Image (cartoon, rainbow, N blue to C red):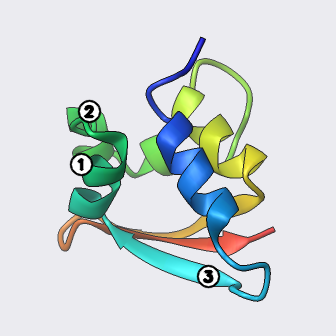
């Protein structure tokens, strides 16, 4: 079974090992997912948290790919991931 955020995980896994960070607009993430981010992703910084507990399936996607969220800009609608 594939999850909604699997394309994001695959995208992050394909980045060169030498790349230590990447900044993605919410729009580019939505293009990768071929789906809209939930409203909470655009309004709630905690949606982008780096915890695997609970029901945050989106977090598992980037953390399993070896990345953490560093900065989220809800006004400009972008997120920076850094390699773990």
Which residue is pictured at 24% across the width and 48% down the height? 42
Q: Is residue 13 visible?
A: yes
Q: Please name the residue that numbered disc 3 is placed on.
A: 21
Residue lying farthest top?
1
Q: Please name the residue that numbered disc 2 is placed on.
A: 38
- In front: 57, or 30? 30
Q: Please name the residue that numbered disc 1 is placed on.
A: 42
Q: Position of residue 50 (x, y in %)?
A: 66, 49
Residue 80 versus residue 6 in the image, above or below: below
Nearer to us of marks 1 and 3 is 3
Crowdedness near tag 3: few (<14), some (14–19) or many (≥20) residues, C-alpha within 10 Å: some
Which residue is pictured at 60% across the width and 61% down the height? 12
Q: Position of residue 55 (x, y in %)?
A: 59, 18
- Secondary structure under tag 1 reads helix
Residue 32 versus residue 24 in the image, above or below: above
What is the C-alpha distance between the residues marked 2 and 1? 7 Å
Using the rendered view, name the quadrant where residue 34 is placed: top left
Q: Position of residue 5 (x, y in %)?
A: 49, 35
- Secondary structure under tag 3 reads strand
Q: Position of residue 46 (x, y in %)?
A: 47, 45
Pick the quarter of the image with the N terminus: top right
- Secondary structure under tag 2 reads loop
Residue 20 versus residue 36 in the image, above or below: below
């Amino acid at each position: 079974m594939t999850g909604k955020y699997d394309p994001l995980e695959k995208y992050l896994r394909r980045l060169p090992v030498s790349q230590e960070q990447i900044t993605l607009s919410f729009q580019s993430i939505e293009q990768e997912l071929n789906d809209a981010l939930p409203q909470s992703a655009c309004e709630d910084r905690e949606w982008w948290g780096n915890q695997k507990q609970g029901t945050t399936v989106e977090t598992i996607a980037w953390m399993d790919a070896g990345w953490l969220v560093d900065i989220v800009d809800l006004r400009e609608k972008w997120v920076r991931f850094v390699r773990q």
